[in-house]
Image (cartoon, rainbow, N blue to C red):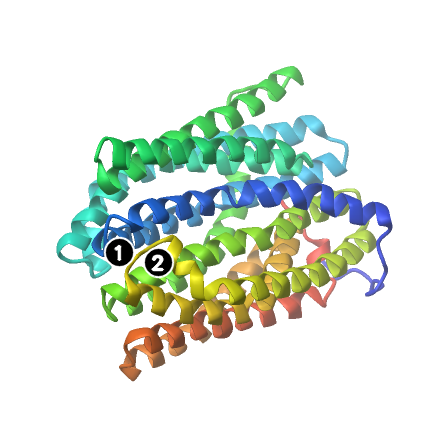
Amino acid sequence: MPASPPLPKTLPPSSGHRREILRLAVPAFGALIAEPLFLLADSAIVGHLGVAELAGVGLASAVLHTAVGLMVFLAYSTTPAVARAIGNGQLAKALAAGRDGIWLALLLGIVLAVAGFLAAGPLLDLMGARGEVHAFAVDYLRWSMPGLVAMLLIFAGTGVLRGLQDTRTPLVVAAAGFTLNIVLNLVLVYGLGWSVAGSAAGTSIAQWAMAAVYVLIVWRNARRHGVSLLPDWRGIRALTRVGSWLMLRTLSLRIAILATVMVVTAQGPVNLAAHQLAMTIFTFFAFALDALAIAAQALIGKELGAARPETARALTGTMTRWGLGFGALTGAVLAAAAPWAGALFTSDADVRAALTLALWVLAAGQPIAGYVFVLDGVLIGAGDARYLAIAGVVNLAVYVPLLLAVSWSGVAGGEGLLWLWAAFSLGYMAARALTLGLRARTDRWMVLGVL
């Protein structure tokens, strides 16, 4: 399809558009941080059990969230598909896409959970886990498998609601799920003495409670509007086609994170434990910044579905500026809190010292992250999945030599973790910013379809 005619690059959105961004982004912030809050709570509870327990949870979490992250297309392909249908006045089509996303999530979740349970030991062997760290990692990963199915259902359900321009309901569900997770983890880990297995089991139960709410909401809306509850395999295949590109995009991100974990594992358990805490905090702030990206997915999909590319361009400019500003703000907060943050998670002085250095580097990269996450959401909302996948591979090719340089340098201790996080938070994220920024300057992404 030929590119559309050049569009105004600086058309300012109305105050109504700004209110619409905030209406979606503010509740999305609360819902998005539910999963990192789960991780923060798990890390805080497990961290006081010991360094081996915390390191084991760190490795298991890296494997678990690789699987979960690859499946995020269940939300990222459903949101723009539903939003475009809503923008075009086709509510039944929107709900049918959501229903198909739920079925796809259930099928994929069952397959991945069974495979993950059986392969837990060998996978963690490949990650370099040994001794107590290996044992705790296997326990955490296997007890997390039931929750994996629930997480995929949550992805699909939230994707439907975001496409329907509803981010408040996911906020309510996330708040309830987080509260339940804290209570269950404290009871199972300390009350019953289940150690890291109790933490994973508590999180799985909370995730299933959340998934049940989402599935019920989607099912009730489908029945109310006369949409069959049975899956449409053509719709599922359409979601899978878009999802395959988004999966490649996400795979490149997860390979980058897993490669980082492999490098830090060789630096020893202290750096591995500190890295786990730093990555958990990074995830928390990433999801916070991603609130604007979720608003972008929903709004850009809706505006392009309604054939209003000029408004989509204007909204992109506004959200990009907000992403940079919010990134600078969160970076300043993180830099100030870095020397004391470690005390929340561990009493080990060496882990806390290494964590402080990593967090200062992470703080410096927050404005770049804000820019990256917003443009990522814009292009996902526009259905530009193929470009995102190709760009992800290019970014990974830039990052791997940086990782190898850190690994081969032989730098150890806190300095080694500092350089590792400089490669990730500054080098890798800068590569992502460049590839996304170049695409956003064109008009090609605005003439693409989602399904």
* Residue 241 against residue 2 in the figure, above or below: above
Residue 406 in picture, x, y percent from top left: 34, 78
Above or below, 319 relative to 222: below
The quarter in which the C terminus is drawn is top right
Separation of residues labelled 1 and 2 (CA atoms): 7 Å
Task: Name the element at disc 1.
Answer: helix
Mark 1 residue crowding within 10 angstroms, few (<14) / some (14–19) / many (20+): many
Residue 24 x %, y %: 69, 42
Q: Residue at x 55, y 28 (%)?
A: 99
In percent of the image, x 46 and y 47: which residue is there?
A: 36
Q: Nearer the viewer, residue 43 or 89?
A: 43
Q: Is residue 438 left or right of residue 203?
A: right
Q: Position of residue 396 (x, y in %)?
A: 44, 69
Helix, strand or loop for disc 2: helix
Labelled pair 1, 2 in contact (Cβ < 8 Å): yes
Residue type pointed to by label 1: Ala
Residue nearest the observer in this picture, 347 or 70: 347
Q: Determine the image quadrant of residue 423.
A: bottom left
Position of residue 9 in the picture relative to residue 433 (left or right): right
Q: Amino acid at mark 2?
A: Gln
Taking the image as shown, residue 138 lies to the left or right of residue 352, namely left
Q: Which residue is mark 2?
A: 276
Residue 349 percent coordinates (x, y)? 30, 65
- Work out which quarter of the rendered image holds the N terminus and state it: bottom right
- Around disc 2, counting alpha carbons within 10 Å, would you say few (fewer than 14), some (14 to 19), or many (20 or more)? many
Residue labelled with disc 1: 55
